[in-house]
Image: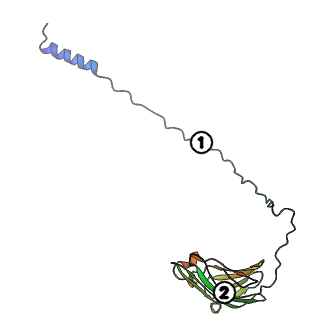
Amino acid sequence: MRLSGPRLAWLVAAILAGCATPEPPPVVTAPAPEPAPPPVVEKREPRIESQPLKHLANRKLEPIKDRPLNVKTNCNFRDHTGYRGRLDLQVKDADVRRFRAEVNIPKRGTCRFDLKEFQQAGTTPVALAKANGDECKVRVWEQDSHVTVAFRDCKTQCSGESFDYLWPILVDARTGKCS
């Protein structure tokens, strides 16, 4: 059997129609409901209680006596990294009478302090000297047989970035040696 003309066209159209798939119906979705917020749970920080150290238990410790500071030293110090300095300090009955310090920090700079640039702002338990027109504070206090000279906010007394590497100066009250 031979197909021609309109029959052939009809047959081709029927075959193609069989291969065609209807367009799917449009999907209508409702907007998803917003999730409910999680319940609010109060978090409480655990209560921290002070526990005595095992080495201090059953010992009768008394606070350090609050007495006027007396120290006199003129010393130099140096460590293995090259951090070095010198300190000239005299405190009598918590009154700072002499204070000059210079600390050289390798590859960072130098910090210099002189009593002329400070005024005393406190006496006990810490001798406090504040820089004139600056935020720099120098504190001197005694603990056991050591005297500590500590610096705070003293960037203007230091060159480079040396203040970021400036440590307190420790003085042995008995010998006058510093480190």
Q: Residue furthest front?
A: 80
Q: Quadrant of residue 111?
A: bottom right
Residue at 16% across, 17% down: 9
Label 2: which secondary element: strand
Q: Quadrant of residue 78?
A: bottom right
Q: Position of residue 93 (x, y in %)?
A: 79, 89
Colour convention of the picture: rainbow
Q: Residue furthest top?
A: 1
How far is the residue under mark 2 from the one under mark 1? 71 Å
Indicate left or right for 166 with 42 as reference.
left
Q: Residues within 10 Å of mark 2 (few under 14, many from 20)?
A: some
**Quarter of the image where the C terminus is located:** bottom right
165 up-or-down from 42: above or below: below
Residue type beneath disc 1: Ala
Residue on which disc 2 sits: 75
Q: Residues within 10 Å of mark 1 (few under 14, many from 20)?
A: few
Indicate left or right for 43 with 161 as reference.
right
Mark 2 or mark 1, whichever is nearer to me: 2
Indicate left or right for 15 with 155 as reference.
left
Q: Nearer the viewer, residue 94 or 40?
A: 94
Q: Position of residue 47 (x, y in %)?
A: 76, 55
Residue at 39% across, 30% down: 26
Res. 36 mark:
1
Res. 122 mark:
none
Residue at 60% across, 84% down: 85
